[in-house]
Amino acid sequence: MATDTDTETFDGFGQVSRTVGTVFRYGLLAATLFGIVVLGILLVYVANDAIQPLTADPGWHLTFFLTLVVPSVAVGSYLYYRNTAALKTGLAVVGLFLVSLMFAAGASLVFVDIVPPLVWFAYVLGIAVPSALVVAVVRYDHRLPFLARIGLTLGLFYLSLFGLTGPVGEFLGLPQVVPGLVTVIQTLPFVPTDWMMLALTLGVGVAVAVGSHFASENGRRTGLAAGVLALLGVVAGAFVGPALGFTPVPATVIAAMAVVPTGAFAGDVVVNRRHRREGLVLTAILLGGALLGAFVVELAGFAGPQSWVDWQFLTGAHSSSDASEAGFYPAIGGSIMLMVTVAVLSFPVGVGAAVYLEEYAPDNRFTRIIDVNISNLAGVPSVVYGLLGLGVFVTYLNQPAGTLFVAGAALGLLILPIVIISSREAIRSVPDEMRQASYGMGATRWQTVRNVVLPRAFPGILTGTILALGRAIGETAPLLMVGVPTVLYSLPGELSDKVTAMPMQVYAWSSLFAGDDFYTKAVPAGVVVLVVILLAMNSAAIVLRNRYDS
């Protein structure tokens, strides 16, 4: 029975005081707020050095205050008290556009300077054609044995990607008899233009995704119309982009990865989420206010902040003589290629290990030892993984130091225990009743894992992997150990090429080129870019988690 006294006595616990619990709770709150405030002050200090907002003309500040801040606060306050769901939707549309725009810019960098669109187009078709053939054969003969399916799949993919006899024949000293589909496509005398190949690959994928969503919500006709509009929007990007200062290739990528998905999300709100339509007014004010403010300050001639994070900084290469000409482009591109390599190396191995340990491995002493070691490896300092990469890949396997493969493999080892642990937690969160129901329907263990466990656990697996990649992108010690250069002036074209990364470039500016401008301007600018990319990756993980937990 509840009482009004501050202390009570219970058998086995002695005297229990509510005061202690209250003090403990507010102590934790104070510690949390203190940490957040200190971190915020540090980030504001760094951002001020990098962006220098106070160097702008007073008219610049007044213009954006009137066109962006005042209308946004007014509409946001109205929605906060009247329709909170609409407020969240309006902010979500803006956030989706900004984050997807950042990822689209990274993908544009890849297609412009690293992977030619023709190579991308060839490999997409080289994977799509055998996939379609396998699906057609399986649908034609449902009773095809499992081993026959595996053999057919591997054979078709091998022929499509490598031809006959391919790498195996080269290893055995056999001549190449038939070229693979990928090689045939790349040697065709007539191929579509670069932006057309990107529109056919990225645009079709986006159109299918958009059309499938609207078809499930509003029927096939609406889904077909939405898919066609999405594809036309991607194609239109190649024509609208040059008018805005972009070449057709990055314009197509930005349209496919940022503009069309954001427009589809807003269209879904208009058609299917009518009670949240008001939030799109806030979206229009935020985006329109920013554009209007930029137009007014350009027309009036107001000088903006003398920011070090400008277009030249994001697209230029390093300069060892003048900090004002120092660029971050090779480091940004190197980090993107490193993250792709790390994901390819660590994701399949980590998820496979998690599936085996959770679904197949027996509970014995050996597996318990493996569990303990995986948990311990997740807490090992990152420099140890750099030494491991140096010993295994450089010394033992005789790979050149500082290459994309060696650096990616070292970072892959770093996040592999994290991927395994997060994947196991996601798999463990799948209710056991779902497995038993699958077994009760006559499914095998593999069918249960493939059709029940993995689809349910995949959002958690993907979230954990993105957070692990967020840790890897900011690591410096492993890269130093495997000999990654601190400064490069170009992007890697192959796995055997040298690569650098954003943390290495910032380290170089703060140590090797530690002049006043480098240390107080270029370093904060690099840190701001790195933190923004980390926040974008973490926000993607949060959105995925909230989307599939709701």
Image (cartoon, helix red, strand yellow):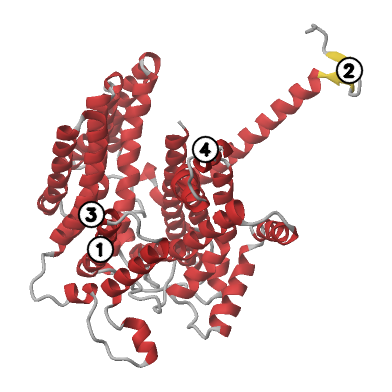
Nearer to us: label 3 or label 4: 4
What kind of element bears circle 2?
A: strand
Name the disc covering residue 437, or none.
4
Q: Amino acid at mark 4?
A: Ala
Nearer to us: label 4 or label 1: 4
How far from the left and from the top, in percent, is residue 473? 48, 59
**Position above or below: 503 against 483:** above
> The N terminus appears in which quarter of the rendering?
top right
Which residue is at the far left?
190
Q: Give yes or no for contact between labels 3 and 4 (Cβ–Cβ under 8 Å).
A: no
Name the disc covering residue 10, or none.
2
Q: Residues within 10 Å of mark 4 (few under 14, many from 20)?
A: few
CA gap, disc 3 and disc 4? 38 Å
* N-terminal-most mark, 1 or 2: 2
Q: Amino acid at mark 1?
A: Val
Residue with the mark numbered 3: 202
CA gap, disc 1 and disc 2? 69 Å
Q: Amino acid at mark 3?
A: Leu
Say which quarter of the image contains residue 96. Answer: top left
Residue with the mark numbered 1: 124
Q: Is residue 126 left or right of residue 46?
A: left
Tell me if residue 291 can be seen: yes
Identified at 49% across, 83% down, the residue is 399
Q: Is residue 245 left or right of residue 335?
A: left
Tell me if residue 289 can be seen: no
Q: Residues within 10 Å of mark 3 (few under 14, many from 20)?
A: many
